[in-house]
């Protein structure tokens, strides 16, 4: 019984570390996405990224938000 508890505790700690790592990666991703979106707003039309690229970044950000929310 004690061995099972120790194993479960170890597994829980490993999962918690993974969650923390993912949360940090998510925060970095959000920061980069905000930067890209701000650059798109301030760039002249000739230098701007296409609408499909914008939608792709937006969809990826929303997916990351859902993933992060499910880990809480």
Image (cartoon, helix red, strand yellow):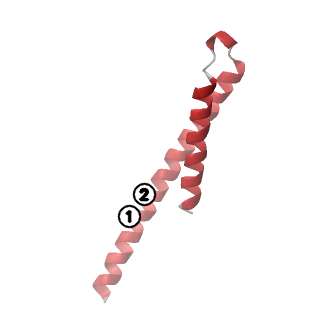
Q: What secondary structure is marked by label 1?
A: helix
The residue lying toward the viewer, choosing from 32 and 63, is 63
User: Which of the 4 image quadrants contains residue 13?
Assistant: bottom left
Q: Is residue 8 above or below residue 47?
A: below
Give left or right: position of 68 versus 38: left
Cβ–Cβ below 8 Å for labels 2 and 1?
yes
User: Which of the 4 image quadrants contains residue 51?
Assistant: top right
Q: Is residue 66 above or below residue 58?
A: below
> How much space separates mark 2 and mark 1, taking CA atoms?
6 Å
Residue reaching furthest to the front: 52
Q: Which mark is residue 18?
A: 2
- Within 10 Å of disc 2 (Cα), the crowding (few <14, some 14-19, many 20+) is few
Give left or right: position of 40 versus 68: right
The residue lying toward the viewer, choosing from 2 and 72, is 72
The structure residue drawn at horizontal position 41% and vertical position 70%, both measured from the top left corner, is 12
- Within 10 Å of disc 1 (Cα), the crowding (few <14, some 14-19, many 20+) is few
The residue lying toward the viewer, choosing from 53 and 7, is 53
Q: Position of residue 68 (x, y in %)?
A: 55, 54
Image quarter where the N terminus lies is: bottom left
Q: Which mark is residue 14?
A: 1
Residue reaching furthest to the left: 3
The structure residue drawn at horizontal position 65% and vertical position 23%, both measured from the top left corner, is 39
Image quarter where the C terminus lies is: bottom right
Q: Which mark is residue 62?
A: none
Residue reaching furthest to the top: 46
Give left or right: position of 19 versus 9: right
């Amino acid at each position: 019984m004690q061995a099972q508890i120790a194993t479960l505790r170890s597994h829980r700690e490993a999962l918690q570390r993974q969650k923390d790592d993912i949360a940090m990666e998510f925060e970095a991703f959000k920061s980069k996405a905000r930067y890209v979106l701000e650059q798109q707003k301030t760039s002249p039309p000739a230098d701007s990224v296409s609408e499909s690229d914008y939608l792709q970044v937006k969809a990826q950000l929303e997916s990351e938000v859902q993933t992060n929310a499910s880990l809480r």
